[in-house]
Amino acid sequence: MMSYQPQAPLKDRGSLQTSAILLIVVGFLCGGTVPAIFGIIALVQLDSDPHMAQKMNKVGWIIFWVTFALIILFLIVYVVFMVIIFGAATLPFLMGG
C-alpha cells in the first residue's frame, strides 16, 4: 500500500496569483523566458490544480533567482576581466615605456 505525504499548506489564492503574475513580468523583463513560462503555467492551473500551481510558481522563482545570480556572476567576471586586460594594456604607458 502506498502512503501519500500530506501536501504543504496552500497559499491563499490571491497571493499565489500575485506571485505568478510578478514572476511572469519579472521573468520577461529580465530576459528569463523559462521563469515566465512557469509563471504562466501556475496562473493557468490556479483554479484546476492549486497545489501544482504553487509548485510551478516555486520552481519558476527558483529558476529566476539562479538565472539572475548567474547573470550577476557573469557581469562581475566580465568587469574584472576588462579591468585586468585594459590595466595590462595601459601599464607600459603609465610606467613611461
Image (spheres, rainbow, N blue to C red):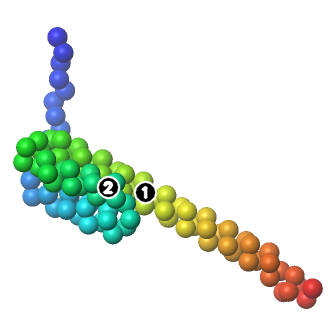
The residue singled out by tag 2 in the image is 35
Question: What percent of the width, then of the height, locates residue 20?
Answer: 20, 57
Q: Residue drawn at (80%, 78%), measured in percent from left and top?
A: 89
Judging depth in this view, the residue of 94 and 6 nearest the camera is: 94
Local packing at callout 1 (Cα closer than 10 Å; few below 14, some 14-19, many 20+) is: some
Q: Residue drawn at (76%, 77%), measured in percent from left and top?
A: 87
Q: Secondary structure at mark 2?
A: helix
Residue 73 vs residue 24: left or right? right
| Extreme-bottom residue of the structure | 96
Q: Quadrant of the C terminus?
A: bottom right
Tell me the kind of residue under disc 2: Pro
Residue 91 vs residue 22: left or right? right
Q: Residue drawn at (26%, 51%), measured in percent from left and top?
A: 38
Label at residue 14: none
Tell me the kind of residue under disc 1: Thr
- Whether residue 81 is visible here, answered yes or no, is yes
Judging depth in this view, the residue of 42 and 18 nearest the camera is: 42
Residue 83 vs residue 70: left or right? right
Question: Does the CB distance between marks 1 and 2 fall below 8 Å?
Answer: yes
Question: What percent of the width, then of the height, locates residue 37?
Answer: 27, 54
**In the depicted structure, whether residue 16 falls above or below residue 7:** below
Local packing at callout 2 (Cα closer than 10 Å; few below 14, some 14-19, many 20+) is: many
> For residue 16, which quarter of the picture?
bottom left
**In the depicted structure, whether residue 95 falls above or below residue 65:** below
**In the depicted structure, whether residue 17 falls above or below residue 45:** below
The residue singled out by tag 1 in the image is 67
| Extreme-right residue of the structure | 97
Q: Secondary structure at mark 1?
A: helix
**In the depicted structure, whether residue 97 falls above or below residue 59:** below
Q: Earlier in the sequence, mark 1 or mark 2?
A: 2
